[in-house]
Amino acid sequence: MSIPLPGFEDVGPRRGSDGPGSGHGHRLKASAGPEGRVRRELAPGAVHVPGWLSPAEQRELVTACRGWARGPVPIRHTRLPRGGVMSVQTVCIGWHWQPYAYRRTADDVNGARVAEFPDWMVALGRRALVDAYQDTAAGDAYTPDTALINFYDGEAKLGMHQDKEERSSAPVVSLSIGDTCVFRFGNTETRTKPYTDIELVSGDLFVFGGPSRFVYHGVPKVYPGSGDPATGMSAGRLNITMRVTGLS
């Protein structure tokens, strides 16, 4: 497990990608079409848009996340109630996620209030929803107020789980930057099959809401060295998930 590094610099030696594993369940390889904007609906309410973020937007997000990773609440490996420690490193904005609740202050880290959720992130989340669902009204009604920003080094994984601490059933908007990962998209009843594995590449957008809002999902693998340093990420994968907490 790596030491949390503010700014995601040099988290480990860059290795060549070992390519997609065989895994279990169905796999869809990500392939961008014209302008990288081919929508793929995996299930009702679950939409993958490859290449949604431009290279410039990716660099801007990396710069912003690098700043948030330094504080006021620094990026860290979250400790779970039963004593386990997550392999991904996480920093939050808007609200602090502490298993399994949201708070304004990071009582499990340093007691500081987390950074505010900026208006430009709200606008980005709304644009994401419009493009994913092709529904302007849905985008206009979307007001995310928190984001969990997860950093994966080459060894980090995220087990199958549901995002269910929110009091709102509004969609989750997920953005990927850096190394490619296998994203496992399951069902609402169990952590096991049926599920679908897809590859999320730098710049990809994934939205899940409606009937798919509480689907089990996880990241069983990251391909080290598969990202482009031009994004501002020298190594590793950055995942930004915007949510609506439903809290006042």
Image (spheres, rainbow, N blue to C red):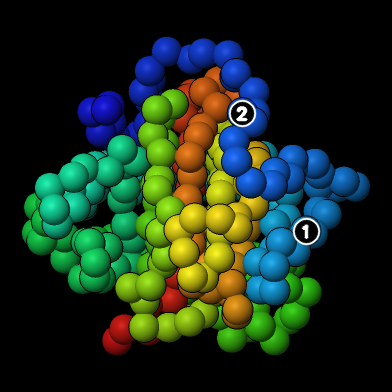
Which amino acid, mark 1? Arg
Residue 234 in the image, given as x and y percentages of width and height:
49, 23
Q: Which residue is mark 2?
A: 21
- On screen, 28 above or below 214? above
Q: Earlier in the sequence, mark 2 or mark 1?
A: 2
Q: Is residue 132 left or right of residue 234?
A: right
What residue is drawn where x is 78% and y is 74%? 134
Q: Position of residue 123 (x, y in %)?
A: 57, 69
Label 2 Cα neighbours within 10 Å, binned few <14 / some 14-19 / many ≥20: few
Q: Indicate which disc residue 40 carries.
A: 1
Q: Amino acid at mark 2?
A: Gly
Q: Residue at x 51, y 80 (%)?
A: 170
Does residue 166 appear left or right of residue 58 in this picture? Answer: left
Image coordinates for residue 212, horizontal then vertical, percent: 59, 72
Say which of 187 and 165 sits in front.
187
Q: Position of residue 215 (x, y in %)?
A: 52, 67
